[in-house]
Amino acid sequence: MNRLKNNENCRLRLKILIIFAISRLIMLIMVPVYNGIMGTHRSFLFLMNEWDAKKYAYIINHGYTHPTDIDPQANWAFFPLYVIMCAALKAVTGGLINTYVIGMIVSNICIIIAAFFAVKGLKKQTSIKEEYTMIMPVLLFMAPYTFYCSSVYTEAMFIMFIVLFFYFLFEKKYMAAGIMAACSSGTRIVGCILVFALVVQLYIDMEGTKISFGKVKTFVMDMLKAPKKILSVLVCPLGAFAYMAFLNETWRYHVIIKSPVDKTDAYLDIRMSRLHGERMSISRL
């Protein structure tokens, strides 16, 4: 108990977990309230995992598939890192736990980690009073749309990687920041833009806040002499690029607009062609 009192990180974790528990208790209470108002009997899992959560759950169970007559939308629009983590946890548990529960476990762990490092970052980078820094986990756990961070969605994981990126960037651990940016880009495509934040911070750390042609030239020359820093920048979009390479090797398209025989319009029954798989079929209108 004394160790807990004297350990700042332990105290912070305990505070965050208490706020987290209160927020999730409120969510649980809202289920019977919703059912009472709407006259339904929907479960907590159902209400927390609407819309795209069902698509993520399908990918976790079956992987990426081609469009079907039931669902003509391509599910490979959803980036893979969150899916991979959920599928790995599901495999470790032997598939005994419901997929939605698996996804919610991953999401909740991610948002707790994000809250912890967000508060630590605030304490290190600002002079905000400690009690005010706890507003951050309150917002992450209880803001109106943060229920997505408890559902089978990528939001929690994406926020976690962004927080870790800026945390390591402040610590001048550029490679770690680059890896977090890469993971972010493997979670959502917009994670790629973190590379600009890394380049700007590198410039500030190496040349200061003033911008001039001479300083930019010096920055470029200094970067060329620092291969580790260059590598940290190049790593940033790696998650998205790796997924693009996967799609390129796994799915191929063959698009034909006009019939090569009589130039009539043709209806394209588009099918994704798996590697070494079948080609698309074309039928007359």
Image: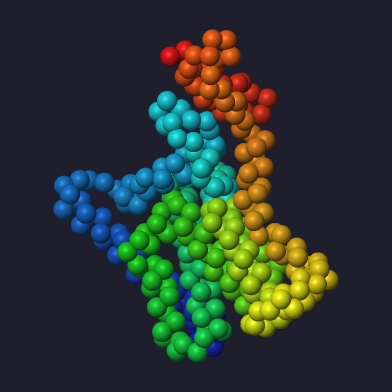
Q: How many marks?
A: 0
Q: Quadrant of the C terminus?
A: top left
**Front residue of this view, candidates 103 and 253:** 253
Percent x, y for residue 254? 60, 25
Percent x, y for residue 107? 47, 57
**Front residue of this view, candidates 82 and 95:** 82
Left or right: 223 in relation to 90: right
Q: Residue at x 53, y 53 (%)?
A: 188
**Front residue of this view, candidates 90 and 282:** 282
Q: Residue at x 31, y 50 (%)?
A: 47
**Front residue of this view, candidates 262 and 275:** 262
Name the quadrant containing residue 145: bottom left
* Farthest-out residue, top: 262
Residue 204 can be seen in this image: no
Percent x, y for residue 252? 62, 30
Left or right: 26 in relation to 101: left
Left or right: 52 in relation to 30: right
